[in-house]
Image (spheres, rainbow, N blue to C red):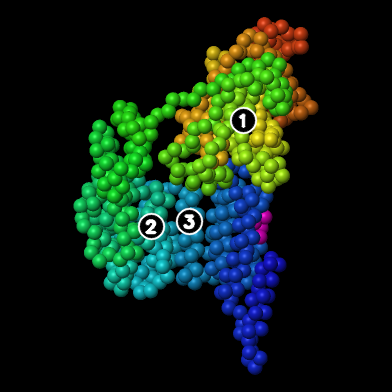
Amino acid sequence: MKNLLFVLSLVTAAAVIAAPADKAAKPANPSKVSQEAWKTLKKETDALIKKNFKGGFADYWHNDIDAARAKLEEALTKDVYLNKEKIEICSEIARCHLEATRDIAAALEAVEYPFKKLQLCDADKVLAETSRANLKSLVDFNPKAKVADKPKNKITAEYFDAEFKKAKAPRGYHGRLVREYVAYCNATYGKDMFDKIGEMIDNQYKMNPKSDILNDVYRYISTSFRAEGYMATAECAEELLKFVEKRAKNVPGPSARAKFTYAAKFPVLSEKAYAYAKEFLAAKAPEGMKESDKKGYIKDRNAAALFVAEADMFANPAKAEQIGNKYLETIEKKGDKIELAKVYEKVAKKLVAKGDEKSTKTILAFHAKIVPLREQVKCECFWWNDAPRTLTGVLDSERYQKAKKSLLSVKYGENLKFLIETDAAITGREMTFDDGSKFRPTEFFSYADEVGVRIMLRMFLDNMDDIKMGLANPPGFESYVATGIDNPYHCLMIDAREGAKLSATFTTQYDNITGHRTAKTNFRQESVYLDDGVALLLTMPWESVFASIPSEKTPAWYVEFIHWMRGGYTLGGSPSVHNRSSFAELKFTNFNKEADAKIKRRLLFAGKKIFGASCSPRGNGYIEKWQDPELGDQEFYLKKVKPFVSSINAYTARIKKTMTDDEVIEIYAAVGEKLFNVDFIVEQMRRQWLDEKFTKE
């Protein structure tokens, strides 16, 4: 708040200095002071909110969001802010409640504050109503609202009559006004409402024939309807289309252009949109069109051509190539294989959604002529008994030096340059680009020992002197590891610098034998700088992937490594990031009974510790807590948990250093995976117990 007072003092001081000596200083403009103070406060609170913003990956801390909310709530008590800014402050407070703890009640209370505590003029009421409507569109879903449910509102119909007839208003004002009117009508879409909005539009066109008000108004109508769940209904679509058709003549270009543009937004109007698109394409471009209007016209015409092409291909896949070539001619991109491949992909996805396998294969056959299907890359992960435990030990070994390595030699992305550029910009992936010089591709070498699966990446670089001095960084990797044909994959961002820690961004996850376990946190990496490049060793311990150790059930893993240098080079040939279908097969070889026993021996000792911790009273283990007479459930423990624990203990008592290989394999088959999943298993027991106890008829 000191910052806000400082801003206020500067504004006031500036006014005093600027005033002539013989005249009284002009008082500061309250509106400007309020705006500047809010601008400063918004910047401060946005910075706090950003620290905890969840984005694509949940972060369950919200202390900084709470701090931002406290600043905003304090601001409401300050006289420096006028009503307009206080309404915006209340909207931000509501945002904080939703973002931090999803407290809908508190958020709704925040947007009601202006109505309860402030003296609002008509313009302020519209702004406050917009804030309320925006919030409700986020948290409410009421597709069956009726006129009878219309809330009692201080804003009257007469108010809208007066506002709709205003000759001049800021850009976008009438659109926002329409949205408020839709909210006032409680999102019903009857003829009366459209007629009234139409009168306002017609009035604006009379005063300004070049007005873009129809687009402005449509955007707000559709936003309101989408929030209320009406956008997918045929009744709403038909009513809105009639509204648009009646006024399409006012939109620059043929009326079919406007009708297509709006009809195409409604899936339920696809047949009409198709007819309008054909009509639009058949019409000549308006004469005397300004250069500034041509770009939008061409964009809409190309969209109509694409709409027709996709519909025709969907209806007649056998003629997809002929239809596609006609489309390219229409958009003046004859022979553009990239554009044609994109159309094939869109149509194929729609056919898959329809469940039409035969037609999908027909389309994909045409796609394959442009982008030939690749054979899956196959790599080896062999068992290395008594392998070196360090990266330098592996590099110095004769076995590594003589081994055949796979190469990250397939160019990333191929014809999907757009995906590379946009995705890299969003995620912060760093890439260098191909300058045409020769280079030696990164080597991929994999083996397994009793610790886990190991993957070595050996890159060759020309600037190692700069890298060692800290003037440059070695290019990093984006990698994916799926520990089985149907298993979720781990996404690993690898920084190749010495001493860097593995950055595991997330794991795609669904129900499997690991109990939704996120194994990535136990993966680790080690890097070492060499004279001609960098060697990196990735280790995935068996404890993290116990459900996917080499066996008949899991003969291979599936991996992809993308080296972000020279535009990206890959192991499996990924045309895009997260492209599961292009992962390389990592085949396990040379795994015998001795290797199997070594892996499972290590896992049994690790699993025994996990089981012991769950049963331990010292650590308030998950199993132990059910014995507690107050916090637990002794009946559940005695009838369900205790027998389970006894069955496991019969085997854990045998887990000793003196076990033979046969005993190891026997015990692991009986309880190995149960030891790692013990908490998950008991949790399932609990759900079943409660279901049986409270849902019996």
Is residue 156 or residue 35 the one in the foreground?
Answer: 35
Position above or below: 201 against 561: below
Q: Dot 3: few (<14), some (14–19), or many (≥20) neighbours within 10 Å? A: some
The residue beneath circle 2 is 219
Q: Is residue 614 magenta?
A: no
The quarter of the image holding the N terminus is bottom right
Position in image of residue 303 (x %, y %): 31, 50
Position above or below: 203 against 627: below
Q: Are marks 1 and 2 in contact (CB under 8 Å)?
A: no
Residue at 72% over, 44% down: 469
The residue beneath circle 1 is 457
Residue 516 visible: no
Q: Earlier in the sequence, mark 3 or mark 2?
A: 3
Q: CA distance from mark 3 to mark 1?
A: 51 Å
The residue beneath circle 3 is 134
Labels 1, 2: front one: 1
Q: Earlier in the sequence, mark 3 or mark 1?
A: 3
Residue at 41% over, 65% down: 172
Q: Name the image quarter holding residue 404.
A: top right
Classify residue 152 as left or right of residue 513.
Answer: left
Q: CA distance from mark 3 to mark 2?
A: 14 Å
Q: CA distance from mark 1 to mark 2?
A: 52 Å
Q: In this view, which residue lies farthest toward the bottom?
A: 22
Residue at 61% over, 85% down: 26
Amino acid beneath label 2: Arg
Position in image of residue 439 (x %, y %): 55, 36
